[in-house]
Amino acid sequence: MSVKESQTDIEVLAKDLPLHCPMPDMSSWNSHPRVFLDVSKTGAAQCPYCGTTYRLKAGEVVKGH
């Protein structure tokens, strides 16, 4: 996982799937109930709790999700 542009726009890799927010390396102050997000269909998803946008890195191939 790498952060792009701001803390609210996170680029993820296929190996990061299944994706959930908050991610394990996020600070504890940003905690909210874990929600699973599907980026495999559209390439992006937004967390309904904190608004963080997750984007699948260009060229990543999602298999079995």
Image (tube, helix red, strand yellow):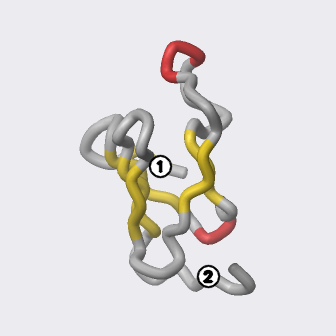
Name the amino acid, label 2. Val
Residue farthest left in this picture? 5
Q: Secondary structure at mark 1?
A: strand
**Residue 19, located in which quarter of the rendered image?**
bottom right
Image height of 23 relative to 19, above or below: above
Q: Secondary structure at mark 2?
A: loop
Q: Residue, x 57% and y 85% (percent of image)?
A: 61
Residue 65 locus on image (x, y percent) = 69, 79
Residue 3 locus on image (x, y percent) = 41, 44
Going by the image, does 19 lie left or right of 51? right
Residue 36 locus on image (x, y percent) = 62, 54
Asked if the residue under mark 2 is in contact with the one under mark 1, i.e. CB atoms within 8 Å, the reply is: no
Q: Residue, x 66% and y 64% (percent of image)?
A: 17
Going by the image, does 37 lie left or right of 4? right
Q: Residue, x 61% and y 32% (percent of image)?
A: 33
Residue farthest right in this picture? 64
Name the amino acid, label 1. Ser
Image height of 56 relative to 21, above or below: below
Residue where numbered disc 2 is placed: 62
Foreground of the two, 16 or 46: 46
Task: Find residue 35 and name its label.
Answer: none
Q: Residue, x 69% and y 86% (percent of image)?
A: 63
Residue where numbered disc 1 is placed: 2
> Callout 2 environment at 10 Å: few (<14), some (14 to 19), or many (20+)?
some
Going by the image, does 54 lie left or right of 12? left
Image height of 26 relative to 44, above or below: above
> Callout 1 environment at 10 Å: few (<14), some (14 to 19), or many (20+)?
few
Residue 16 locus on image (x, y percent) = 65, 59
